[in-house]
Image: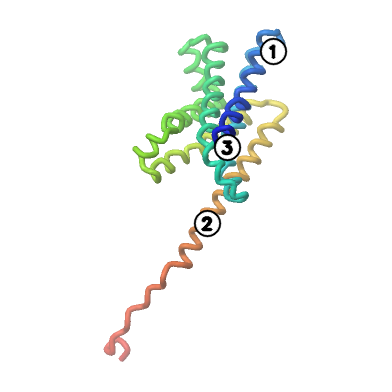
Amino acid sequence: MRLRLTKIALFLAALVPLGRLLWKAFHDGLGANPIEVITHSTGDWTLIFVLTTLSITPIRRLTRQYWLIGVRRMIGLFAFFYGTLHFLTYIWLDKFFDVHEMLKDIAKRRFITVGFSAFVLMIPLALTSTAWSIRRLGGKNWQRLHRLIYFTGILAVVHYTWLVKADRRKPIEYGIVLGILLAYRVGVWAFEKASEKRKRPAIPAPARSRVEVE
């Protein structure tokens, strides 16, 4: 019951950024360049939800709040939701579904190429974020597939960094958070490997024959 109420609260909270955008749109609050405001807002929230998803595992392990695993998939799906809105803003409001112009952008503007790649990597993650997918793929295969989120986060930060021309404080801050989250995982992996190596029984050296000794 507690987890269900928590999920409902998080679901409603995750819709607040969209609600604010809609409120501003209907009350002429998006400024002189509404497309830019929508693009930056949806992009920011995509990255925030990606980083939040990545933070669930270390927070759960460090605080022993194991219920957090129950909301990770929902947060990940909201990352995809805002990523889709970000992508739709580009192809609809910015390019008006002009495929030729979009392909030129992807080929010539490196931040578009990287951003598009990050979005593409999110698609299989969203499609397999169900209990059925976990059973179908098997736990280990599902975990391997969902490691794509690491590359999504990296590409998203690079996309943001290359997009911004002047004040890069925000993408740098996102990059620092991402770096800490990835460094934590590398540290855990190295520690577990070292522990396995210590626990592995030593293989005795083969006995040398008398002839070899002589």
Q: Secondary structure at mark 3?
A: helix
Q: Secondary structure at mark 2?
A: helix
Return the x and y of residue 25 as percentages of the image width and height.
Answer: 66, 10
Return the x and y of residue 103 as percentages of the image width and height.
Answer: 47, 18
Q: Which residue is labeled 2 in the image?
A: 190
Counting residues from the start of the chain, the first of labels 2 and 3 encountered is 3
Residue 173 seen by the camera = yes
Counting residues from the start of the chain, the first of labels 1 and 2 encountered is 1
Q: Distance of mark 1 from mark 2, alpha carbons?
A: 47 Å
Q: Which residue is labeled 3 in the image?
A: 2
Q: Given the image, on which type of amino acid does mark 1 rest?
A: Leu
Q: Distance of mark 3 from mark 1, alpha carbons?
A: 38 Å
55 left or right of 118 in image: right
Q: Residue furthest bottom?
A: 214
Q: Residue furthest front?
A: 1
Judge depth for marks 3 and 1 and give the one in front.
3
Q: Given the image, on which type of amino acid does mark 2 rest?
A: Ala
Return the x and y of residue 165 as percentages of the image width and height.
Answer: 68, 26
Q: Which residue is labeled 1 in the image?
A: 30
Q: Is residue 202 above or below residue 180?
A: below
Badge 3 density bin: few <14, some 14–19, many ≥20, Cα 10 Å? few
